[in-house]
Image: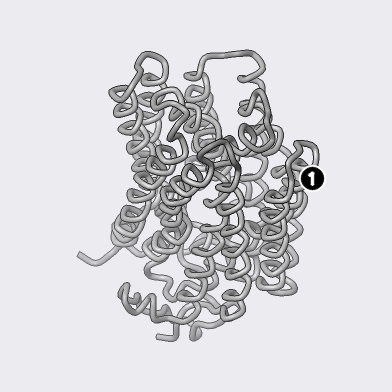
């Protein structure tokens, strides 16, 4: 049976409507990865090997995110539908949050940790089941010349979602609410933006068509490429590996900020101080997100990424040299300026590099792997952290954050190979 090819629509949805679900997803992952999960690991498994267990949990979740998006994306391309996957994925995601919240509320020890891990796997499955087809909507609905603006709006909404997450977790810590409150809050904030997107983009399931690219022949649609051909297509190849390197840098730092506040900055309430540091990152990223996306439509994607990667690499090095909390907030803001600029261009760069309008969801699912697969680095980084920090030292943070800076620099060097606005391959 031939795939259902969507029909044209008058124009793309408003960028805030199209990207609303990313707002909820950003809130979801920040609270879960940086606050709820580190606290849960300590609750179930203790302090001695917290880095190892947190890295293991993150890596196990990354395996789901590595395998699922291309498979679900390909199914979505064959069916011509996007939103049913979002609905079912959201449902499974919420079920996983309920399991994790129940575990921290009523269980303990290794048995409780087993249930906690099960809930996290459900969260990963549901979230990736939803986002792989959803990721296809920007390249499918938005013309090339507007993708920088849409990517900037998406990055801004993600940053605002993260800012709300940091403020909420700060309030939960200040009010001494039970750990399960984090999971209830995540579920609530994830659901409402999802409903906005589901309603606002409802017509896309039946009526949306890929937007022709200047690189395509007039009136033609490039054929789908096999996965082997996809990775042999130079624009996609270089964009994929650039994103891998930037994600490796992020995941060498992000999961361990809570422990950095505890062990290096000597904060008595690391959850609360981490929330403030995250707020500094996010406020700065909001400043650079919209500006970066708009500049990339005029100047190109790569100059923005050069500046972004340089700021994030410098921030990682300064975290190594710093040992006080107030300077750390300034360093966090520097990192946020780079991160916001990168995310504002990241989506546009990936969309520009897709080789075929016929396989947007599958190819965006493969591209998504470039961001989630590096989460596996949390396992060896967590083990390195614990190994070098034995005896009360902080050498582990020097090693882990130093490697992060190297990843960012390598990403800057590699992005030079990415052609600007590659567009679909010629038929």
Residue farthest toward the front in the current orientation of the protein: 391
- For disc 1, the marked residue is 330
Query: How far across and how far down the image is residue 239, in percent?
Result: 52, 71
Residue lying at 36% horizontally and 63% vertically, measured from the top left: 362
**Quadrant position of the N terminus in the picture:** bottom left
Does 335 sit left or right of 144 as displayed?
Answer: right
Residue farthest toward the left in the current orientation of the protein: 1
Residue lying at 76% horizontally and 52% vertically, measured from the top left: 334
173 shown above or below 214: above
Colouring convention used in this rendered image of the protein: one colour
Does 30 sit left or right of 276 as displayed?
Answer: left
Q: Observer-nearest residue: 165 or 207?
A: 165
74 shown above or below 144: above
Local packing at callout 1 (Cα closer than 10 Å; few below 14, some 14-19, many 20+) is some
**Quadrant position of the C terminus in the picture:** bottom left
Query: How far across and how far down the image is residue 148, in percent?
Result: 65, 64
143 shown above or below 37: below
Q: Observer-nearest residue: 116 or 391?
A: 391
Query: How far across and how far down the image is residue 45, in percent?
Result: 39, 27
Residue lying at 39% horizontally and 51% vertically, measured from the top left: 82
Q: Observer-nearest residue: 231 or 116?
A: 116
Quadrant of the rendered image containing residue 171: top right
Residue lying at 34% horizontally and 33% vertically, measured from the top left: 117
Q: Observer-nearest residue: 253 or 185?
A: 253
Quadrant of the rendered image containing residue 421: bottom right
Query: How far across and how far down the image is residue 211, in percent?
Result: 51, 69
Q: SS of the residue at dot 1?
A: helix
Total numbered badges shown on the rendered structure: 1
């Amino acid at each position: 049976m031939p795939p259902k090819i969507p029909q044209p629509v008058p124009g793309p949805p408003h960028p805030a409507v199209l990207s609303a679900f990313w707002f909820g997803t950003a809130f979801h992952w920040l609270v879960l990865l940086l606050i709820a999960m580190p606290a849960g690991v300590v609750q179930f498994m203790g302090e001695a090997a917290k880095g190892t267990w947190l890295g293991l949990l993150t890596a196990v979740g990354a395996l789901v995110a590595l395998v699922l998006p291309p498979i679900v994306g390909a199914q979505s391309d064959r069916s011509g539908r996007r939103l049913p996957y979002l609905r079912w994925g959201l449902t499974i995601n919420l079920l996983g949050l309920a399991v994790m919240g129940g575990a921290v509320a009523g269980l303990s020890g290794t048995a409780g940790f087993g249930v906690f891990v099960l809930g996290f796997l459900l969260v990963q499955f549901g979230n990736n089941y939803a986002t792989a087809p959803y990721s296809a909507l920007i390249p499918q609905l938005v013309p090339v010349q507007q993708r920088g603006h849409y990517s900037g709006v998406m990055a801004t909404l993600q940053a605002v979602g993260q800012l709300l997450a940091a403020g909420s977790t700060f309030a939960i810590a200040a009010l001494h609410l039970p750990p399960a409150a984090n999971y209830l809050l995540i579920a609530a904030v994830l659901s409402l933006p999802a409903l906005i997107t589901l309603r606002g983009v409802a017509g896309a399931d039946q009526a949306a068509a890929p937007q022709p690219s200047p690189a395509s022949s007039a009136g033609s649609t490039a054929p789908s490429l096999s996965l082997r051909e996809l990775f042999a297509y130079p624009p996609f190849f270089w964009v994929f590996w650039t994103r891998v390197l930037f994600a490796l840098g992020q995941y060498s730092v992000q999961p361990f900020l809570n422990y950095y506040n505890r062990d290096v900055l000597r904060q008595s309430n690391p959850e609360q101080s981490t929330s403030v540091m995250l707020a500094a990152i996010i406020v700065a990223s909001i400043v650079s997100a919209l500006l970066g996306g708009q500049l990339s439509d005029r100047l190109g994607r790569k100059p923005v990424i050069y500046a972004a990667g340089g700021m994030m690499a410098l921030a990682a090095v300064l975290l190594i040299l710093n040992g006080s909390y107030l300077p750390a907030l300034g360093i966090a803001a520097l990192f946020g300026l780079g991160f916001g600029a990168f995310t504002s261009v990241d989506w546009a760069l990936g969309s520009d590099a897709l080789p075929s309008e016929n396989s947007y969801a599958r190819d965006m699912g493969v591209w998504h792997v470039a961001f989630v697969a590096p989460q596996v680095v949390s396992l060896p980084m967590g083990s390195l952290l614990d190994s070098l920090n034995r005896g009360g030292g902080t050498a582990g943070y020097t090693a882990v954050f130093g490697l992060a800076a190297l990843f960012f620099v390598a990403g800057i060097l590699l992005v030079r190979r990415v052609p600007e606005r590659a567009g679909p391959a010629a038929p």
